[in-house]
Image (cartoon, rainbow, N blue to C red):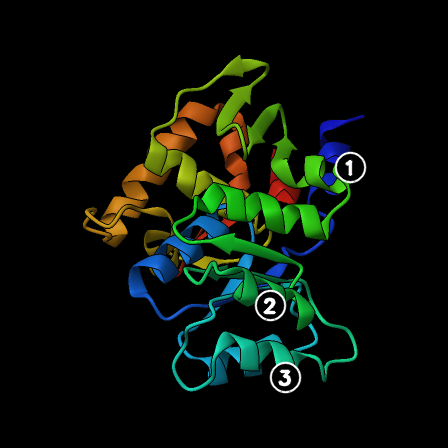
Amino acid sequence: MTQTGVLASTMASPPPRVVVVEDDPSVAAGLVRGLRLAGFEVELATDGTTGARLAMAPEVDAVLLDLMLPARSGFEVLELLQRRPAIPPVIVLSARTELGDRLRAFQLGAVDFVPKPFWVEEVVARIRARLHTPEQLRALRTVAWAGVVVNLDARTVTVAGEPVALTRFELDLLAYLVQRPGRAIPRTQLASHALGPLDERTDRTVDSHLARIRKKLGPAASALTTVWGIGYRFDPSGER
């Protein structure tokens, strides 16, 4: 299969959309960041009423739901979701781990229950297990073009079969871009989703990281195009 064919099979479908309903700021921030870096589109709700509204949208692929929420409880959100013609997979994330709570969540339509605290990586794996076949999973985890292979799960990059050493921030930025081909991503969005909380998160910081990534990728870096006045785009179709 050609490199172009690998890319086409890898990126043919849009990223799955996940609604996170969580009122704890630190837990919510960790989930949103981890899911976005894993390639999901994420919407966040910090109360049950907003969460139910977002989860009812037809384009939602999965829901992560806390049980103890302001406005409406997670149980009430599950009850409301029963009105949908097709209910997306709902994974409950909760510190309420008593058997009665777990059984009630399953009776109301939840497909999984993850007790807090949890590893975000495990939550990502559980979502993928509910959404995809093994073949689709392999496709989601690898992006390839012009001799470059980015393995999103192993967090490795090779160019012409040779490993390339990227820093954590460089790899996070590259992963965020290659999972959104053809989209102009603003610098502020890249900084918010891919740079650490202690980073200055300035346009210059993003530009510096992208410059180093381009240098390490060589000619294939022409797929990382600058969108003047906005940010950057991953455009493998325009790679030379």
Distance Cα–Cα, label 1 vs label 3: 33 Å
The mark closer to the camera, 3 or 2, is 2
Residue at mark 3: 80
Residue at mark 1: 135
How many residues crowd around disc 2 within 10 Å: few (fewer than 14), some, or many (20 or more)?
A: many
Would you say residue 54 is visible in this rendering? no
Give coordinates of residue 229: x percent, y percent. 37, 61
The mark closer to the camera, 1 or 3, is 3
Residue 105: give its label: 2
Relative vertical location of residue 102 with respect to residue 208 in this rendering, above or below: below
Which residue occupies 52% across, 27% down?
A: 154
Q: Which comes before the other along the chain, label 2 or label 1?
A: 2
Viewer-nearest residue: 5 or 239: 5
Q: Which comes before the other along the chain, label 1 or label 3?
A: 3
**Quarter of the image with the C terminus in it:** top right
Residue 114: give its label: none
Distance Cα–Cα, label 3 vs label 2: 13 Å
